[in-house]
Amino acid sequence: MITNYNFLIAFTIFILGIFAIITSKNLIKKLLALGIFQASVLLFYVSLSKIHFAKIPILKCLNFDKCPEIYANPLPHILMLTAIVVGVASLAVGLAIIIRIKESLGTIDESEIDNMRD
Amino acid sequence: MLDMKLILNNLPSIIVILPLISGIIIAVSVKKKYAWHYSFFTIVTTLVCGLVIFYLTQNNFQINYEFGGWPAPKGIEYKIDKLSAIILTLTVTIATFAIIYSKKIIIKEISLNKIPIFYGLFLICVSGYIGITVTADLFNLYVFLEISSLASYGLIAIGNKKFSSYSAFEYLTFGIIAATFILLGIGFLYSTTGALNLYDIKNQLQNNEFHLINLAGISFIIIGILLKAAIFPLHIWLPNVYQNAPNSIIIFLSAIPTKIAIYVMIRIIITFYELEFFTKYIDKLNIILQILSFVAIILASLVAIFQEDIKRILAYSTIAQIGYIILSISLSNNEAFKVAVTLMINHSITKSSLFMCFGVLEHNTGTTNLKKLSSCLLNQPLMLIMITINLASLFGIPLTAGFISKWYLIKLILDVNLWFVIPIIIGSILSFIYIIKIFEAIAFNKNKLDEINKFTITKSMFLTCLAGTSLNLLLGINTYFNYQLTDNFFETIIR
């Protein structure tokens, strides 16, 4: 467990993120907690790619059979580039929606909006 | 100039890319007067492509497509079989109805300078759902799911009702939590198998020793899908979205997103594991799903009776119908998946026809509150007949599509266990109560003495209502397009 501390940290951030989404009253805080929640999954994927005593994935020479090495796995990093873009897009859409909420309802506090609804 | 062979060879990518690029172009650089015309042309072309794909797969021709020519494990692959083609055609048909419906109505629902953005977002949303049905790569599925979900959050928030934007924000919160759970599940499966292509993962899972990690991965994916499909404990976002979205978009959003989530679950289960996933693989999972679906059917119908707004009644009715679909999936045999697909098709057509007709009502009276509606439809016999046929389909009266799906569902359940029919009967009786409440408010309520003299229905609204209702009747009379389509499923579904 001590050597796999990356995964422990990823799940701690996961749970903290969900807790913050559920208990925040301010809508902007909820949105930022969503961002933190997504960051934990990014950390999980990236720490999958580590191999012990592996080199950076750049080929030493052009022919792999002449200089074989163990390289770390670059694929999860690339997948997470896509996931980061998706996270940024979600943040942008959420912030735009919050601007419209402020225009139409006048407040961005969740408990006040719930009172308005009834 | 048009090389038919080139188009036919690249059809799976054309059907995804065409709405995406047209949506971006329409949103950015088109005159407001012509936004509808460009988007209508795009969606009709997509519909033609979808019908060609449907025809090809019905004749047992399986479509494989590798993006960029890169072969399967390294590249992204699209594979279309019968199940994908059916859901694809359903999606594009209802999107066509929604775009035709919105021609003159859209001005009343969103402000004038946002109309090109509306059509652009709608086409991007449709392209995302089409991408989910054709892809065979798990990460690609996640990306398309996020494309379509983000576009739909924008589409709901663009309406001008008071709580439109807050309903969109609630949907956004739940939707992003669901998508992140799905991403984490994909991460677990990737860590044990090393592959992202659906069929590669299946091959690796059979040789695998990491049972607990695979179980965790599949569980995270299923929970994310339960949230997106509004299955009982995770359905909280649904009624507010149905009530506050603009009319033109709720036709599409009531029918398609939840069904696509259930399609993703069916695809993952059938590809990775055997058919009896719920009974054998995870112990007692089928009992949990059955209990959830019983509670959904009875409780959602009960809550629907006490609502005051027609759209909220229809929202809770959707939650009950999704309970029926989950009940049939949890029985986990050949017949169960066929019944689930039949239920999905029939419910989509019924719900979007209902929302089309009630959109006409709201256009004229300005409200859908049961207490404020007068008997405005007494002078409009054709609209009243269409609403009656669609409400009858919701309940399950013969000659409509709802009857066919309920018949096959009850037949399936009677073969398994006699006691399971009781919640369905209770749910149907409760649904009869709220259907009568809606009908009474439209046709018999005499609260306001002044009836509406000038009842306006535009040609496009009338055409789409008529098309939806006649499709409903057609599916009820001839089962070729719902149940018999699923006949050769398990011979042609890619394993």
Image (spheres, coloured by chain):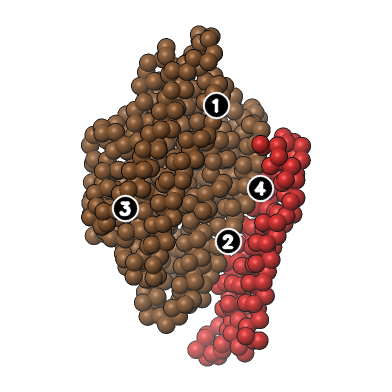
The answer to whether the residues at label 2 and label 3 have Cβ atoms under 8 Å apart is: no
Task: Give the chain letter for brown.
Answer: B
Identity, as a three-letter code, of the amino acid under mark 2: Thr
Label 1 to label 2: alpha-carbon separation? 37 Å
Marks 2 and 3: which is nearer the front?
3
Label 1 to label 4: alpha-carbon separation? 31 Å
Identity, as a three-letter code, of the amino acid under mark 4: Val
- Residue position for label 4: A93
Q: Is B325 located above or below residue B377 in the figure?
A: below
Identify the residue at horizontal 46%, vertical 67% (top origin): B218
SS category of the residue bearing label 2:
helix
Q: Is B315 located above or below residue A29 in the figure?
A: above
Label 3 to label 4: alpha-carbon separation? 43 Å
> x%, y% of residue B337?
31, 55
SS category of the residue bearing label 3:
helix
Identity, as a three-letter code, of the amino acid under mark 1: Asn
- Residue position for label 3: B420
Label 2 to label 4: alpha-carbon separation? 16 Å
Identity, as a three-letter code, of the amino acid under mark 3: Phe
* Structural crowding at the residue carrying mark 1, measured as other residues with C-alpha within 10 Å and reported as few (<14), some (14–19) or many (≥20): some
* Structural crowding at the residue carrying mark 2, measured as other residues with C-alpha within 10 Å and reported as few (<14), some (14–19) or many (≥20): many
Task: Looking at the image, tell me whether mark 2 or mark 3 is earlier in sequence order.
Answer: 2
Which chain does tag 4 point to?
A
Residue B303 falls left or right of residue B110 = left
Label 2 to label 3: alpha-carbon separation? 34 Å
Residue B25, numbered circle: none
The answer to whether the residues at label 2 and label 4 have Cβ atoms under 8 Å apart is: no
Front-most of B114 and A111? A111
> x%, y% of residue B238?
53, 44
- Residue position for label 2: B180
